[in-house]
Amino acid sequence: MPPVRVIAGYVSVALIWGSTWATIKIGVNDVPPFVFAFARAVAVAGLLTIIAIALRQSFPRGRRTMAIAMIVGLINIGWSWAIIFWSEQFVPSGLVSVFGAAAPVWTAVLAHFIVKDDRLSALKILGLALGLVGTVILIGAPEAAEGTAGLIATGLLALMPITWAIAAILQSRFLRTVAPIPTVALGTWASALLLAPLALLQTPQGQHWTLASVLAFAYLVVFGTCFGMVVSLWLYRKLRPTTITLIQVLVPAEAILIGTVWLGEPVTVRMLGGATLVVAAVALNAIAGGGLPPAEERLAADPAPAD
């Protein structure tokens, strides 16, 4: 059984990540979504940069490493936050989290073609099928009153986990030996540049920062990104990757519960049915990958290519 501190870290990450979706919803109710996302990116990048300098951690060097760090940051933060923050105006926060939970399934598919000794199995293929069916069911799940915007939002959310899978493969192949905090800081600065013009377009709409949106912003910056990121990276040295993947099974359930109870978001049979299939897909993917060695063993056995 893992040490108590590992269990505490695992549970804390699951609880925090399950609550961030509703927290975003609170923020975008008061502040234009792109403005809110840009402000979060700048705050996170600044805070992580200060921490990296204080800890004397080196920023990525070499053109390829820097380029990949920025690409990964743009996918995981800039592109994703733009979609998530905008979509939560039209889509229940719990449903948004379900789309994100499909990322491990797509990662397994891409790994089959790119990562050595990580091939698709019958269970992974079954998981992919369930995930695809669940995603198809979820597209259009928001109420018809949301109209075209809701349909576009769910379409973008369906594409988002595929790009997360691409980022995961890039990190696995090229960013395994760099210091995580300055690397994420670099990617977040790049994301801030991406979000800046979108935020400027929404600036004329006005900003109405309330106590609720300020608290939501602080929670997302400190706990949702900085704490969650650092603890999750630490967990990869203590637990099998497939064990950490199971967090994605817990997050949608918590997000849907919080959205329903706290925010009064609607829950439909279609939404629950699609969510069940996606969660089952992630669980099958984790079970199928149960034989992978811990992260430390994999890093030692297969070092990243040099610049």
Image (cartoon, grey):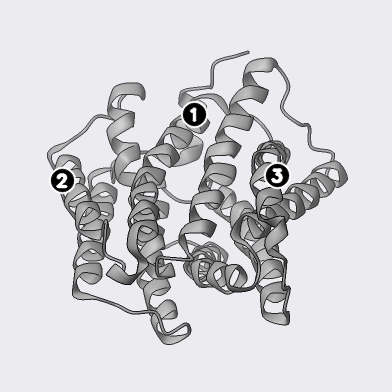
Viewer can see residue 101: no
In the picture, the quarter occupied by the C terminus is top right
Residue 267: % across, % down: 29, 77
Q: Residue at label 3? A: 196
Q: Residue at label 1? A: 170
- Image quadrant assignment for residue 101: bottom left
Q: How far apart are marks 2 and 1 (CA)?
A: 24 Å
Under mark 3, the amino acid is Ala
Residue 29: % across, % down: 58, 73
> Which numbered marker is on residue 129?
2
Disc nearer the start of the sequence (1/3): 1
Q: Are marks 1 and 3 in contact (CB under 8 Å)?
A: no
- Numbered disc 3: secondary structure: helix
Disc nearer the start of the sequence (2/1): 2
- For the residue pair 253 and 284, the one nearer the viewer reads as 253
Position of residue 296 relative to residue 170, above or below, is below
Under mark 2, the amino acid is Ala
Within 10 Å of disc 1 (Cα), the crowding (few <14, some 14-19, many 20+) is some
Position of residue 90 relative to residue 237, above or below, is below
- Numbered disc 2: secondary structure: helix
